[in-house]
Image (cartoon, rainbow, N blue to C red):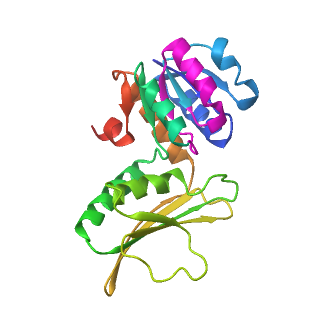
């Protein structure tokens, strides 16, 4: 049985808790929110894996918990800068770690398809559009950044985050990334490829956050048997 500690008691944390409690192969060790984050360093119960869907400011406390317990880490927290992501990766030197901005299997497939399309549609203009609920605090979404990496693996193109004013003709070596916010949208991501007189569009729509929580729980059950290291969602789920 996999003992799971959840960090983050917001909407995602609540759904993850429901899934863990309903899974006969899992046991809930506890749930820690921002108001009790100091407990991670000394008092939070030990677990086999910690699932973190909290806030970037809680990273030092998550690090302390992993160092204290040697628990595996499934991180879905977004908004990390480069230095903070380096710290998350560094945890993989001692325990198995996965970080993903999106734990949907459908998005994982979208990312693969987008990479294949970008390679095949040489010379096409690429634009990425993401839509989320009006409570989301970061932009562009972590998933949009994953898709940008997928279509621009060598960094040959310059990302432009929205356009305004007399920005001139669109350069060939540019990828537009656009964020829409409104209502209760769980998450929609589209990658557009514009060619001469034709367009290819790949789209994923999430109708519930439950798909992300389910993917995170699946990842948690898989990662506990892995050796120390930093894994991608694709590596963990698809080999």
Number of callouts in the render?
A: 0
Q: Nearer the viewer, residue 179 or 109?
A: 179
Q: Nearer the viewer, residue 103 or 191?
A: 191
Q: Quadrant of residue 64?
A: top right
Q: Is residue 34 above or below residue 163?
A: above
Q: Position of residue 37 (x, y in %)?
A: 70, 25
Residue 54 can be seen in this image: no
Q: Position of residue 81 (x, y in %)?
A: 55, 43
Q: Residue furthest bottom?
A: 197
- Which contiguous range is marked in magenta? 52-80
- Residue 68 lies within the magenta run: yes
In screen coordinates, is 131 left or right of 2? right
Q: Quadrant of residue 199?
A: bottom left
Q: Is residue 190 above or below residue 211?
A: below
Q: Quadrant of residue 156?
A: bottom left
Quarter the N terminus occupies = top left
Residue 162 can be seen in this image: yes
Quarter the C terminus occupies = top left
- Residue 46 lies within the magenta run: no
In screen coordinates, is 121 left or right of 201? left
Q: Position of residue 80 (x, y in %)?
A: 56, 42
Residue at image coords 65%, 33% = 8
Q: Position of residue 109 (x, y in %)?
A: 35, 53
Q: Is residue 168 above or below residue 155?
A: below
Residue at image coords 68%, 39% = 10
């Amino acid at each position: 049985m996999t003992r799971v500690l959840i960090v983050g008691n917001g909407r995602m944390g609540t759904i993850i808790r429901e899934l863990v409690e309903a899974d006969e192969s899992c046991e809930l060790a506890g749930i820690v929110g921002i108001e009790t984050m100091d407990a991670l360093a000394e008092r939070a119960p030990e677990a086999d894996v910690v699932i973190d869907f909290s806030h970037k400011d809680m990273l030092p406390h998550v690090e302390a918990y992993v160092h204290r317990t040697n628990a595996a880490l499934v991180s879905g927290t977004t908004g990390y800068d480069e230095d903070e992501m380096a710290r998350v990766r560094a945890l993989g030197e001692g325990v198995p770690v996965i970080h993903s901005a999106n734990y949907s299997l459908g998005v994982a497939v979208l990312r693969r398809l987008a990479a294949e399309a970008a390679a095949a549609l040489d010379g096409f203009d690429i634009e990425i559009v993401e839509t989320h609920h009006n409570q989301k605090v970061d932009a562009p979404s972590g998933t949009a950044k994953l898709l940008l990496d997928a279509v621009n693996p060598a960094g040959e193109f310059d990302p432009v985050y929205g356009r305004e004013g007399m920005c001139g003709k669109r350069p060939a070596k540019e990828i537009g990334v656009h964020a829409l916010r409104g209502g209760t949208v769980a998450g929609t991501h589209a990658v557009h490829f514009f060619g001469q007189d034709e367009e290819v569009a790949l789209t994923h729509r999430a109708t519930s956050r439950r798909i992300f929580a389910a993917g995170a729980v699946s990842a948690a059950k898989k990662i506990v048997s892995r050796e120390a290291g930093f894994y991608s969602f694709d590596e963990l789920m698809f080999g």
